[in-house]
Amino acid sequence: MSTADQAGTSMRSASGSPAESTRPLSRVQNEAVPNGALTNGAPADQTPRPAASAPAPAPRGTGRRVRLTVSRVDPWSAMKMSFLLSVALGIAGVVMVAVLWMILKGMGVFDEVNGLVGQIISEGDNTFDIMDFLGFGRVVSLAIVVGVIDVILMTALATLAAFLYNVSSSLVGGLQLTLTDD
């Protein structure tokens, strides 16, 4: 540290422009100073302290705008994401079908259909029961099969779409996005 820094004066460079001004050096140790003790020739409770200046708030204006280009989509990450999303959609589909079947059963729709078809067919001993075709086990099993096929197809199509995007992006430059920081 130079003597000018210790004295609290500013130095000028050889070109004559002022350098960064310095403030007086007053170091307070981690020791407790008894009240009324002298520090740098002044009592401890009257030691001049530099004024704390808070940083000026940033001006409120428009957000920063950034233009980005999506030039490549990783097929592996597209496959993982599409697999997880299609599994979630498959589970939601099975639950939706089960709830819908229970609502229709509770409303008596299947009994009404049985009565209507029984009046139309009325072949003596042969009675029609729609539950032979639309029983809860059958409907949920079919929903699970459709969900599994959905998982396989959606995963394959999303991975294929990532490959096709990469090929077309190399030809035309990709998808351009403008993002703002509000």
Image (spheres, rainbow, N blue to C red):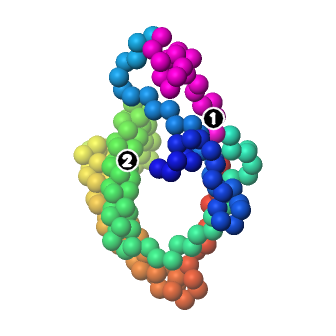
Q: Please indicate whether residue 70 sits to the left or right of residue 159 in the image.
A: right
| SS assignment at label 2 | helix
Nearer to me, 98 or 130: 98
Front disc: 2 or 1: 1
Mark 1 residue type: Ala
Q: Please indicate whether residue 121 sits to the left or right of residue 136 in the image.
A: right
Which residue shows up at 42% across the image and 80% down it? 163
Q: Is residue 133 visible?
A: no
Q: Position of residue 95 (x, y in %)?
A: 35, 43
Q: Is residue 89 visible?
A: yes
Find the magenta span and give its range.
Answer: 36-55
Asked if residue 167 is among those painted magenta in the image, a careful observer would answer: no
Residue for badge 1? 54
Using a 10 Å C-alpha cutoff, classify the residue at mark 1 as few (fewer than 14 neighbours), some (14 to 19) or many (20 or more).
few
Q: Which mark is residue 92?
A: 2
Alpha carbon of mark 2 to alpha carbon of mark 1: how far?
54 Å
Asked if residue 45 is among those painted magenta in the image, a careful observer would answer: yes
Residue 102, compared with residue 81, is above or below; it is above
| SS assignment at label 1 | loop
Q: Position of residue 71 (x, y in %)?
A: 51, 77
Q: Does the CB distance between marks 2 and 1 fall below 8 Å? A: no
Nearer to me, 151 or 12: 12
Number of numbered discs visible in the structure rendering: 2
- Of label 2 and label 1, which has the lower sequence position? 1
Mark 2 residue type: Ala
**Residue 102 falls in image quadrant:** top left
